Image (cartoon, rainbow, N blue to C red):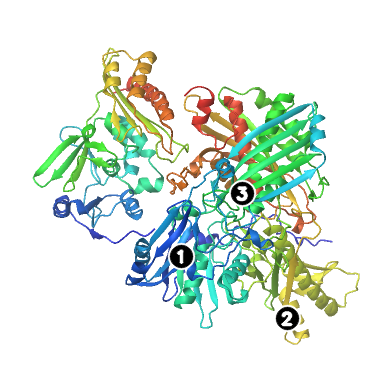
Amino acid sequence: MNDTKTNNNSLIGQSIPRIDSPSKVTGKAQYAGDIILPGTLYGKLLLSTVAHAKIKNIDISAALALPGVKDVIVGKDTPCIKFGNWRLFPNTQDELPLAVDKVRFIGDEIAAVAAITPEIAEAAIALIKVEYELLPAVFNIDDSLAPGAPLIHDENKELTSNISLDRKIDVGDIEQAFKDADYIREDSFLVHPHSHAYMEPCATIAETDAEGRVTIYTSTQTPYIVQCLLASTLGIPENHVRVVKPAIGGGFGGKMELRTWEFCAAFMSRRTGRPVRFVLTRQEELEIGRRRHGMKIKSKVGFKKDGTIVAKDFEAYLDGGAYNSMGPTATFLCGNFGAMLYRYPVYRYRGYHVYTNLPPSGAMRGFGAPQAMFISETQMNMAAIDLGIDAIDLRIKNAMVTGDKIEGVTTISSAGFVESLEKIASATQWKEKKKNLPPNKGIGIGCYSFISGGVFNWFNTQYHFSACEVRAYDDGTAHLFTMSCDIGQGSDTVLRQILAADLGILPNMIRLTAGDTAMTPKGDLGTWGSRVTLMNGNAILDASKKIKNELAKIVSVKFNLNVIHDVAFADGRVFAKANPKYGMTFGEAVTMWVKMNRGEELTARGVYTPRDKGLTTPAYSFGAQVAEVDVDPETGVVTVEKISTAHDCGTVINPLSVEGQLEGAIQMGLGYTLCEQFAIKDGKTLNTTFLDYKVPAAEDMPQIVSYKIDTYEKEGPFGAKEVGEGLVIPTAPAIADAVFQATGYRCKDLPITPEKILKSQGKI
Amino acid sequence: MAIPNFNYLAPTTLKEALTMRVSHGAKSSIMAGGTDLLIKMAHRNHHPEYVIGLNCVADINYIRYNAAGNLAIGPMAKLSTIMDHPDIVSHFPALSHSSGVTATVQIRNMSTLIGNIVNASPSADNATPLLVLDASLVIMHEGGEREVPLHEFFLGFGNSVMKPTELIKEMILPMPGKNSGSSYQKISTRSKVDIAGVCVSAFLTLNDAGVITTARIALGSVAPKPIRVPQAEQVLEGQKPSIELFRKAAALSREEAKPISDMRASADYRKAMVEVLTIRALEASLLIATNKTH
């Protein structure tokens, strides 16, 4: 056979550039903040200036009297319906759109103004007078849990302390296991909060039709979640709310809840009949935006002399700030991630989500894993030294492999972890370099594993976890409708690539509509937990299969194909695999189908819901990362010279996107490890600009090399699994280990600062 | 964040600008590159009613020698021009370095050297190099002009001797003698592209016998204003350079540094770094001074 035509899946593994790049690079992309509708009013929020207080009185009269002000609302004007993403447990929904009786952190939202210009809105906010009765406030976990500490949510009679929620995991007999250990590693750690620092501050604009239905354009990762929670807080049916996701400038977990400004825009738009718009400033973002949980963690790991792990006892206190936000999920996942990477035959986890009078922590890239794995990886590095075993050898000895189980929690359906470790050891010449380190140089390792979407349903959706609709047209094109949101990670490109590969047509033959609750299929929870490629990819393949099934019938009938012949889809054609001349173009096949169905449109809905996949996820990524650093012995300044990563994300759909994820993750990991840190004094965030909240710049990036470990994840589309979040995890432990090798300073209290290094050496 | 309303005035000569300055006084601000001013206004930290922009004033972005053979720098000379200017690179290495590491490419393309100085921030990258290079500012006022040495210019955080009715005409950099060298050293939380957590500049001139005839040291981010350290300078002058001598000067610099602890660094760390950076700045200056061919 001399048929040289490429196979169906030739698009898989191709570095197709982002379909949104031209519009973003030329400034044409429309973000929520770019949308101004006729008659738009400009919203502004009044934020609490105190950390914990009863609201005695709010006087809005002067603000209302200001010419140009069209609406001023306070908590009591709203239906006062609490919200939160854990709808399955209504008691965890602890947040009101605007504070009513009490404020719980500096930045808690108290009132909102809508005016004809942003300047008038700002001036009106300054005219609102709030009378507070101050309450004692707590700004860290210890104070919050101390006897006599003020109860931050005293309205919740089920709570007797500031612990809003806990999570326990018990696998095996922990006491006995530690008795059997030859060596026990026990340490305490502090990890700090971390900002998403997305480039696009949150923005939203809402309009209301004559019947009171709301359309809201908003920077969100989760239109369906915003739709449900906005409808419930407004007290209207879900389908009276349409959420549209425009271009999004990054989310990283920070845009996956209903937020106050979304409620206020919709609520005031209903009251005034005019569009209402909110655009947060960077200062507001850094002051009241969600952040990664700071945690206080104790971890105890038992080993045999030969390095075999016998048990782990892991206790985490999460600083949740003033509200639950996504903290319950982080508390849950932190325990699961504490049990990952290595075979812990016995495992105990105690996780506590603690309220403090600080801005609420929420979901952020890695979601409990960067903290849990900074600890587990650091302890592996410490144990390796004490046991006299190389740190990579110790990991390989205990590494999870395909088929491993955490009893009652999860099964590892594919793992390229050992291969990642072996690859990174040889590629970086790990052992030789480590033996011959020049002065002030260090080399260190950190590893990771992450979920490909969650199987949990605390949101309590009645619909499929992921869904899409595909429409095929007689001109050879298709239209993909999906609720998955491209928030900068590239899913629009990759999802189109998956559909194009499967239908055998070119990606630019596919129109894509994403994230519009009035158009895209209900029952997709959006973009979080590294779920999109696997879950929406599977939904797309489900829909594609249905379309292909219909078109295969057409070709079979037309060419009288024997039932034993398979029908292939490639190069824009549908044909008998064994004899391609029996076939027609994709468009011709659709035309015939439409004729045969008397004018019906060829559409198919595809869905995916992980079922019987344990408590966590259908599939895990794995990887190992080595950092090489230089530490200035006099100043303590750490320069990360090179970061090498070997990772297993299953089949790579788009290498360019994977590379982008890796580079972005390293940048975020560098910041988390070395320079990003909230300066908070008495509950007030002091560094509310990028001058003082220091995100690494392009010039700070090290040399980056990566090695792809080949695995095939049978649960994933074309064998793919996650690559969005896991890569942010290993950088902190790898750099920390390298800094230890260079200086003798072992970080148990992130971030690593020059000062901490010099202090540990007695130099200051 | 939107900038509140203001009146923008666009003079076409410095004289016209001065007239506007005189009539609006404290209600006015001069804008050169605007990279500090506009941000202060956006953050509501500064509320000028009149912004006098120098953009339309012709021929004030110069870097040229004056009649006395010293380098004169105009108010619209951008940092991106300063950093690469051949005369600055060869005669004022501390300044070419500091202007090249101020903020980011985009900001350096907009911001001016004189603006960076008038802003009077204790952490301004270019303040300590200009202090050790013995720069002075020519300030215009209604009755004429006066020349103020830079070490007398700064009064405190964001505060200088320039009056609201005055305007900077230019900066003068005296030509260093032969066997001179200067260096700028900085530490910040991010390795690059960052405001200085601590910065130190040094300047040395040696005579033909290898004795230090002039020494200047300046410290940034360790006091409400950038400061010179005469005690340390006196220790150096009249001596032959040695690492012991530099250590002595560095210890004195450390003593003179009166930093605060803030979110950028603790006082202890800053003091320790003053010592480290002083030695480095002196060593680098010496290297340049002794390698100079002309």
Q: In which chain is the residue bearing label 1?
A: A
Disc 1 from disc 3: Cα separation: 36 Å
* Side of A636 where A717 appears, left or right: right
Which residue occupies 35% across, 32% down?
Answer: B222
Disc 2 from disc 1: Cα separation: 47 Å
**Looking at this rendering, what residue extends furthest in the front direction?**
A148
* Side of A629 where B241 appears, left or right: left
Front residue of this view, candidates A103 and A675: A103
**Looking at this rendering, what residue extends furthest in the bottom direction?**
A598
Would you call the spot at circle 2 few (<14 residues within 10 Å), some (14-19), or many (20 or more)?
A: many
Q: Earlier in the sequence, mark 1 or mark 3?
A: 3
Q: In which chain is the residue bearing label 2?
A: A
Residue A275 in view of the camera = yes
Marks 2 & 1, CB-CB < 8 Å contact? no
Q: Which residue is mark 3?
A: A161
Which residue occupies 28% across, 20% down?
Answer: B231
Please state which amino acid type lies under the numbered disc 1. Answer: Phe
Image quarter in which the N terminus of chain A is found = bottom right
Q: Is residue B85 above or below residue A114?
A: above
Front residue of this view, candidates A729 and B177: A729
Q: Position of residue B158 (x, y in %)?
A: 28, 42
Q: Earlier in the sequence, mark 2 or mark 3?
A: 3
Q: Is residue B203 above or below residue B114?
A: above
Q: Quadrant of residue B48?
A: bottom left
* Side of B77 where A499 appears, left or right: right
Q: Which residue is mark 2?
A: A591
Q: Are the residues under badges 2 and 1 in a single subunit?
A: yes
